[in-house]
Amino acid sequence: QKEVEQDPGPLSVPEGAIVSLNCTYSNSAFQYFMWYRQYSRKGPELLMYTYSSGNKEDGRFTAQVDKSSKYISLFIRDSQPSDSATYLCAMIPSGSARQLTFGSGTQLTVLP
Amino acid sequence: GAGVSQSPSNKVTEKGKDVELRCDPISGHTALYWYRQRLGQGLEFLIYFQGNSAPDKSGLPSDRFSAERTGESVSTLTIQRTQQEDSAVYLCASAVADNQPQHFGDGTRLSIL
């Protein structure tokens, strides 16, 4: 079993829809949570960073963390064609290990 | 520059050759990471540098892989005697500190013929 599970999609939605992307994890040591967006042939771009349970909002993006359920989500409101990309969740544990553990990514297409 | 810079952006080489990949982190970032991304897959950790501490090499897949970093600046990832399974995108990331968000370059696309 992978430490971080993410539905690979692909996910296709109409422009303006609300998108929900999710990851589950098994390691309770994970304390820092990130969402990255990756366009084709580009490096991952940081969207959201949080280290506590609850919601964090930034423009059209909301990150949600539920540590008790080991479940994180990213919501995109009023989705745009420019949001079409692969979305990667990533986590860092407490303690000495500092590398990110990534989900496999969800490919999103927003249709105009 | 403002972001993480990697070179070359693309590298095609023959099986058995050595390759060297370069990463210029964001100025002032003490933490530097290398990851590998195989086609259609998530990122796989390779190695981590933090300041002058000994690097965390726990993700290197074999002794053909090595990396160096000079102080808090440039890093090079070297793959010796390349194999076809080494074909992937090699991504570098840097961070202000080791529990802070990591910022990625656009990677080096390595193809082994």
Image: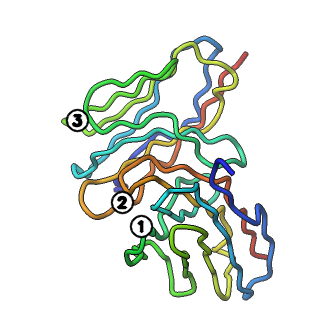
Report the mark closest to the observer, 3 or 1: 1
Depth order, front residue of A3/B9: B9
Secondary structure beneath dot 2 equals loop
Chain containing mark 1: B
Query: The residue under label 1 is which amino acid type?
Result: Gln
Please tell me how crowded label 2 is: few (under 14), some (14-19), or many (20+) other residues with Cα within 10 Å. Answer: many
Secondary structure beneath dot 3 equals loop
Residue labelled with disc 2: A98
Secondary structure beneath dot 1 equals strand
Report the mark closest to the observer, 2 or 1: 1
Q: Residue at x 25, y 52 (%)?
A: A27
Residue A89 image point, x, y percent: 45, 42
Residue B57 image point, x, y percent: 43, 76
Chain containing mark 3: A
Q: Residue at x 45, y 51 (%)?
A: A102
Please tell me how crowded label 1 is: few (under 14), some (14-19), or many (20+) other residues with Cα within 10 Å. Answer: many
Which numbered dot is residue B50?
1
Disc 3 from disc 1: Cα separation? 32 Å
Query: The residue under label 3 is which amino acid type?
Result: Ser
Which numbered dot is residue B10?
none
Is there CB contact under 8 Å for labels 3 and 1?
A: no
Say left or right for B84 vs A63: right
Residue labelled with disc 3: A69
